[in-house]
Image: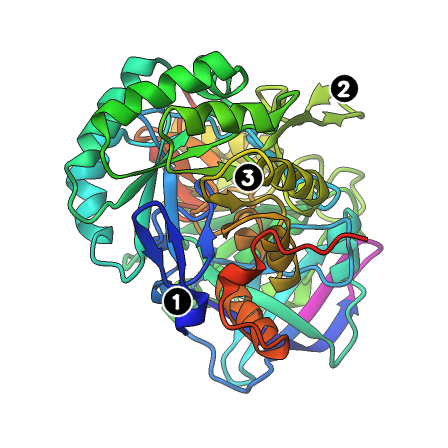
């Protein structure tokens, strides 16, 4: 973990709420190893009401450009302020934080299920799996077509399946009702998104005996295990989602009890 | 930097900047960000006789310029601390001080007695001010009689430096401070969090599982500062001031109001290196004002 100033290289508005912000260390130092599923804590500057940092998952790491991509939904005052960043602005980050998705050594069928802005860490995960020679399926969901973000990026690393609530893109309905889940047999599922979606995915995985990892977004203050606010109930008792997670194996959680 | 040295009971601190219990884990959590050896001391997470799982999620709600928490003293208990955490932290190059909490006087006494035997634990901070536990905690800190009796009982078994952490959720904090001073407390630390709450209006639900929780951060600073100033005029023992400190100016304010030393709390979450920046800021301030010892500043507010 370290605290470092980054410089904003670009801030691209992907739809009415979501921004893709690309940052690089201001002092040009090389990024340390960052794993898919890990997150950063962004300091919200010049916003006196906002006190705490905002935890944002790593969307992608471009090693050649020494660049971290952050996909941020401007949902409140803090994230709204962060999304106002322009090229050249400084952004103070604590990073890399938390656990990561397991990249299994075995070949098999991998499914990455994401909803809304929860698709963010799955791009980097898909890339890492792709680099290991594993091809995966992405199953992404959103309210409508404009909410399915970064489609072209995802398509570089696997096959893309989509579901939208209004049916404007892919199948109509929730990802958890997508026909893919009936038609193909998977060995590993990784998921990130709204909790009801992840619980439904977890139940599907459990029912079908598929290994499953989920990425949580519990409310947190510090992001590095000091405040004990973001706890998740596990089979080992209450643990910090920021240090033991955000990625958990389904078997560790008590969701299905 | 001898001019930053401060004495609290038998403790000689290299500087007056310490970190507040519950915001700094066991120090280990911060070792990637700062050199712990630059701090005057570290107050580790509240420790109880028996392990505690803490309260249910959600335990945190951000509020304007601050946050509410209802962690509820999640910790693995004093025996686990002695066996597994003490061996790791005992050689840190700063004073490591355990915050002790309990539900009954017997709990406090048993916990303090176990800690008294640890060579490299020079002090404890008696937490009679946690607002997030159902029994004990703050209840001990809100009446003079109970504050006095728990201090007296722990004093009998704990010969080293005994600091009592006061609750701000009282009518007159100065009289509580006097009552623990009378029972042999070596110092007081103040303030713990203010009892508060927040409601999610869309769901019409409390933002904390416990409904109420402890408010901390810059939003409490003016009240905390006033309380330190009141206690300064009420007791003769050293005062460790805290409540919303984010920078060296805040720290100097607390010292001018009467604090001998200060603790950085919630702001550690925002800037894990804040504490060392504040040490440097205090040192620069002493330079600029040609002050030879930080002790000269204590209670040094000028009046109109």
Which residue is denoted by mark 1 in the rendering? Answer: B38
Front position in the image: B219 or A133: B219
Disc 2 + disc 1, Cβ < 8 Å? no
Nearest-to-viewer mark from 2 and 1: 1
Could you tell me residue A115's position as x and y percent?
63, 44
For the residues marked 2 and 1, what is the alpha-carbon distance in whole angstroms? Answer: 46 Å
Which residue is denoted by mark 3 in the rendering? Answer: A218
Residue shown at 28% from the left, 57% from the top: A106
Disc 1 + disc 3, Cβ < 8 Å? no
- Rendered image: mark on residue A3: none
Which residue is denoted by mark 2 in the rendering? Answer: B204
- From the image, which quarter does the C terminus of chain A lie in? top left
Q: Chain of mark 2?
A: B
Residue B149 lies left or right of residue A52; in this view the side is left
Q: Chain of mark 1?
A: B
Q: Chain of mark 3?
A: A
* In magenta stretch: residue A14: yes
For the residues marked 3 and 2, what is the alpha-carbon distance in whole angstroms? Answer: 20 Å
- Provide the secondary structure element on which disc 1 rests: helix
Residue shown at 59% from the left, 38% from the top: A179
Displayed quadrant of residue A65: bottom right
The answer to whether marks 3 and 2 sit on the same chain is no
Residue B51 higher or lower than B98, as above or below: above
The answer to whether marks 1 and 3 sit on the same chain is no
- Provide the secondary structure element on which disc 3 rests: loop
Magenta stretch: give its range.
A13-21
Front position in the image: B233 or A66: B233
- From the image, which quarter does the N terminus of chain A lie in? bottom left
- Provide the secondary structure element on which disc 2 rests: loop
């Amino acid at each position: 973990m370290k605290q470092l100033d980054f410089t904003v290289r670009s801030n691209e508005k992907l739809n009415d709420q979501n921004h893709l912000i690309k940052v690089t260390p201001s002092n040009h130092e090389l990024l340390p190893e960052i794993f898919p599923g890990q997150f950063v804590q962004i300091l919200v500057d010049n916003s006196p009401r906002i006190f705490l940092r905002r935890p944002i998952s790593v969307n992608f790491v471009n090693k050649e450009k020494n660049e971290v991509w952050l996909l941020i939904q401007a949902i409140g005052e803090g994230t709204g302020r962060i999304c106002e960043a322009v090229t050249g602005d400084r952004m103070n980050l604590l990073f890399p934080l938390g656990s990561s998705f397991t990249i299994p050594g075995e070949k098999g069928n991998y499914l990455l299920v994401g909803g809304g802005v929860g698709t963010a860490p799955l791009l980097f995960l898909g890339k890492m799996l792709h680099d290991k020679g594993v091809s995966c399926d992405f199953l992404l969901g959103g309210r409508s077509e404009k909410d399915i973000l970064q489609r072209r990026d995802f398509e570089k690393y696997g096959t893309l399946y989509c579901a939208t609530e209004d049916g404007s893109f892919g199948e109509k309905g929730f990802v958890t009702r997508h026909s893919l889940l009936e038609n193909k047999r998977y060995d590993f599922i990784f998921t990130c998104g709204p909790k009801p979606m992840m619980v439904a995915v977890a139940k599907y995985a459990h029912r079908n005996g598929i290994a499953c990892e989920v990425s949580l977004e519990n409310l947190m203050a510090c992001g590095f295990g000091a405040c004990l606010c973001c706890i998740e109930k596990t089979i080992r008792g209450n643990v910090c989602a920021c240090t033991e997670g955000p990625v958990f194996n389904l078997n560790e959680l008590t969701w299905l009890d | 930097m001898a001019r930053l040295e401060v004495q609290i009971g038998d403790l000689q601190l290299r500087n007056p900047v310490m970190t507040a219990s519950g915001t700094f884990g066991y120090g280990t959590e911060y070792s990637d960000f700062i050199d712990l050896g630059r701090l005057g001391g570290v107050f580790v997470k509240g420790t109880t006789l028996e392990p505690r799982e803490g309260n249910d999620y959600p335990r945190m709600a951000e509020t304007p310029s601050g946050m509410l928490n209802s962690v509820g003293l999640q910790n693995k208990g004093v025996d686990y601390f002695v066996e597994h955490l003490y061996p790791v932290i005992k050689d840190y190059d700063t004073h490591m001080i355990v915050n002790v909490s309990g539900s009954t006087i017997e709990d406090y006494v048993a916990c303090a007695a176990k800690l008294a035997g640890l060579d490299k634990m020079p002090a404890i901070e008696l937490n009679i001010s946690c607002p997030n536990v159902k029994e004990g905690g703050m209840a001990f800190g809100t009446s003079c009689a109970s504050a006095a009796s728990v201090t007296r009982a722990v004093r009998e078994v704990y010969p080293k430096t005994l600091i009592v952490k006061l609750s701000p959720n009282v009518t007159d904090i100065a009289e509580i401070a006097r009552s623990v001073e009378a029972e042999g407390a070596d110092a007081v630390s103040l303030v713990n969090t203010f009892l508060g709450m927040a409601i999610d209006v869309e769901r019409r639900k409390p933002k904390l599982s416990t409904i109420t929780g402890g408010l901390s951060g810059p939003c409490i600073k003016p009240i905390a500062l006033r309380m330190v100033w009141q206690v300064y005029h009420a007791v003769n023992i050293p005062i460790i001031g805290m409540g919303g400190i984010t920078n060296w100016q805040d720290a100097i304010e607390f010292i001018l109001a009467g604090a001998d030393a200060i603790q950085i709390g919630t702001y550690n979450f925002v800037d894990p290196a804040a504490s060392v920046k504040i040490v440097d800021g205090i040192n620069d301030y002493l330079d600029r004002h040609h002050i030879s010892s930080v002790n000269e500043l204590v209670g040094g507010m000028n009046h109109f």
